[in-house]
């Protein structure tokens, strides 16, 4: 593997295409919006879980 590294080219004349930036932006925005949609979908379940945990702690502290 190390010998392949030594035989590889030292410089690369590469560039990012103009469409690459918009593609990356679409991926980021899609990920954010997808995450927000999942949070919205499971919001009540998450709130119920936190309320359940808090009420257990309150019951233990009252005893």
Image (cartoon, rainbow, N blue to C red):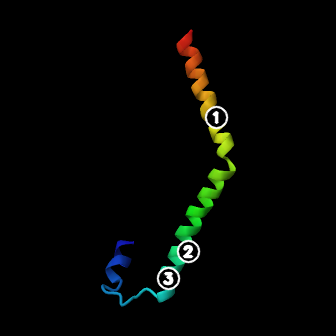
- Please tell me the numbered disc located at residue 49: 1
Sequence order check, earlier mark of 3 and 2: 3
From the image, which quarter does the N terminus lie in? Answer: bottom left
The residues bearing labels 3 and 2 have C-alpha atoms spaced at a distance of 10 Å
* Above or below, 34 relative to 12: above
From the image, which quarter does the C terminus lie in? Answer: top right
Nearest the viewer among 14 and 57 is 57
Rendered residue at 55%/21% (across/down): 57
Sequence order check, earlier mark of 3 and 1: 3
Residue where numbered disc 3 is placed: 20
What percent of the width, then of the height, locates residue 55?
A: 60, 23
Rendered residue at 38%/78% (across/down): 4
Q: Tell me, yes or no, whether the two marked residues, 3 and 2, touch with CB atoms within 8 Å.
A: no
Sequence order check, earlier mark of 2 and 1: 2
Residue where numbered disc 2 is placed: 26
Residue depth check, mark 3 versus mark 1: number of the one nearer the observer: 1
* Above or below, 40 relative to 1: above
For label 1, the crowd category at 10 Å Cα-Cα, with few meaning under 14, some 14 to 19 and many 20 or more, is few
The residue most toward the top is 63
Residue 11 location, quadrant: bottom left
Circle 3: element type: helix
């Amino acid at each position: 593997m190390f010998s392949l590294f030594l035989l590889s080219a030292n410089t690369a004349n590469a560039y990012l295409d103009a469409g690459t930036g918009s593609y990356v932006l679409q991926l980021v925005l899609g990920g954010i919006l997808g995450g927000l949609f999942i949070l919205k979908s499971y919001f009540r379940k998450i709130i119920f879980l936190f309320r359940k945990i808090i009420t257990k702690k309150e019951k233990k502290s009252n005893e």
